[in-house]
Amino acid sequence: MCGIVGYIGKREAYPIILNGLKRLEYRGYDSAGIALFDGTDIQLCKTKGKVASLEEKAEKEITRKGNLGIGHTRWATHGVPNDVNSHPHYSNSGDLVIIHNGIIENYDSLKKELKNRGYTFTSDTDTEVLVNLIEDIQKNENVKLGKAVQIALNQVVGAYAIALFDRKKPDEIIVAKLGSPLAIGIGKDEFFVASDASPFIEFTNNAIYLEDEEMAIIRLGRDVKVRKIKDDKLVAPYIQELQLNLEQIEKGGYDHFMLKEIHEQPAVIKDTYRGRLLAEKGIVKLGGLEDYIEKFINADRIIIVACGTSWHAGLVAEYIFEDLVRIPVEVEYASEFRYRNPIISEKDVVIAISQSGETADTLAAIKLAKSKGAFVYGVCNVVGSTISRETHSGTYTHAGPEIGVASTKAFTTQITVLAMIALRLAKAKGTISQRDFMLYLRELELIPSHVEEALKTEEKIKEIASVFKDVRNFLYLGRGYNFPVALEGALKLKEISYIHAEGYPAAEMKHGPIALIDEQMPVVVIAIKSDHYDKVVSNIQEIKARKGKIIAVVSEGDTAVREMADYVMEVPHTPETLSPLVTTIPLQLLSYHIAVMLGRNVDQPRNLAKSVTVE
């Protein structure tokens, strides 16, 4: 949540910062602002609403000149979304200006203390408290800005990524991080600051990712100086070469990033297993797993922690691991895991799943598991992310940037990685026959072509969307491996269309939800050929008897369900173990087209953020 962009160098800062803010819109926000140093003073412009509104306002109110600046997109925590609460925020003197992602939990006590010292506040934010605390320390302790920031951050409780500068020192930006991501782009006689690398990728592919409780002094003409906030210890920064390119973060001719990402799935699934899976040779090998196979094989259980879509991928993995590897698996909401005093031992393996690698609840669960001695394995998409650094080992998904807030390709690439892990462990443990092992490897290699076939039904799905776009409730039903797909399908519809939807195991319909079914209730049923097929057919008959409208996801060539359903969405036949990779595709498309027909902001749905970096 929130987006941070900064620039210091010889170029005009305004276009870089504004374009950077547009690149970070996927993170979710309700207001935007920018501060520029024009050589004499600070120009400040901020507004409730979108970056486009900021651009329009800036053209009228400020000169937009200067080689130093910071910009921000805010997702409200303290104080309602309005112009005043938008970032950046000044200190009382007007010398310091700051942007901040995160929450200062003890802001109220700090604010009272500062008020007693004569400070006044114009906003309801915790951020304005922080910038005045820094100024107070700077003046009273007669220290440089960097030292004042360090002292102040040792007094605050909470999470933050910050960037600030002093108008009296226009050759310097100070940044710091705890719990929220922050990258520093290293150019030639120029520096960039951002929540991720997308705002500066066309200018440099060299970046420093700050670790938690680190701060950096970025000064023109000097190397970036990184220090530990706790003890002021100097840290040798690691400059990472970025693999991201500009083409990956553009829409590529699609109307929305979400649609582009849905259609990228054949390619990114292949990218995810490329070099790791060689079906003809009977090889599946993941670099991060090989040295730790014994940890998994000897584990008493596997605990999967995740949030949202990643949690649904974890539920699919539970079926795969228990079926193929025969190790008990528990799937936990990361947000609940740390607060229920869980029983964790050194014999447990914890798998943490996150698209961004920055999810605050999942990070907290990782730290708890590590404190109890568990081995923690990460599955995430963003190279250099906090989760990739906090876990003992892990595997990247290679999905490429996912800009749309509603995850699509993250889900399928996570399942791809988890399936490969399960197959590698099953082979090592001897819980799978050579015949079945080879079969699954070949079938996994075929998944991209199956997804391509499923995508070809998009026009038919658009017709179905037009029929049901105005209903207010949906039910989604699935069994076995496809129960989590029902949950994910319902989540996608909720997220981007704002239609109420619930996912259930199909057998649970009789235990309550059946009371909701009438001629106004569409029910999406995943009814592919599987061991549960006859049972699902029975569920469909129960729905039809109550005049419910059936939208069925069926296997290619199905006749029985096709005769009963009002509408069908056909997918290629796939072994049930891997079927979620294919059955989720029509549900993503259905949600997308309903949302488009309703005029929703598909890529930036209300109240949501791509990366939830606060608890």
Image (spheres, rainbow, N blue to C red):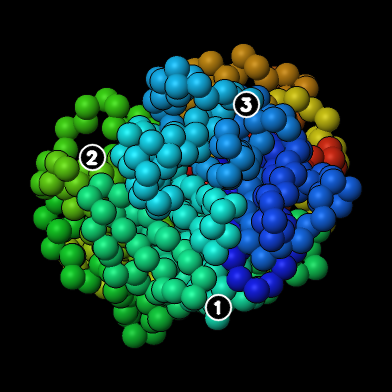
Give the mark, 2 or 3, whose residue is nearer the N terminus. Answer: 3
- SS at mark 2? helix
Residue at screen point 18% across, 65% down: 292
**Residue 500, percent across and down?**
67, 27
Residue 368 bears which disc, if any? 2
**Residue 218, percent across and down?**
47, 64
Q: What residue did someone put label 1 on?
A: 189
Residue 123 bears which disc, if any? 3
Residue type at numbered disc 1: Asp
- The answer to whether residue 498 is visible is no
Residue type at numbered disc 3: Ser
- Distance between mark 1 and mark 2 Cα atoms: 42 Å
Say which quadrant the N terminus sits in: top right
Looking at this view, is 453 or 176 the one in front? 176
- The answer to whether residue 46 is visible is yes
Residues marked 3 and 1 touching at CB (< 8 Å):
no
Residues marked 2 and 3 touching at CB (< 8 Å):
no
**Residue 570, percent across and down?**
68, 54
Density class for disc 2 (Cα within 10 Å; few <14, some 14-19, many ≥20) is some
Residue at screen point 55% across, 64% down: 171
- Distance between mark 3 and mark 1 Cα atoms: 36 Å
Give the mark, 1 or 2, whose residue is nearer the N terminus. Answer: 1
- SS at mark 3? loop
Give the mark, 3 or 1, whose residue is nearer the N terminus. Answer: 3
Say which quadrant the C terminus sits in: top left
Density class for disc 3 (Cα within 10 Å; few <14, some 14-19, many ≥20) is some
**How many discs mark residues in the rendered view?**
3
Looking at this view, is 412 or 320 the one in front? 412
Viewed as shown, does residue 161 lie left or right of 557? left
- Distance between mark 2 and mark 3 Cα atoms: 35 Å
Q: Is residue 83 above or below residue 196?
A: above
* For discs 1 and 2, the disc positioned in front in the rendered view: 1
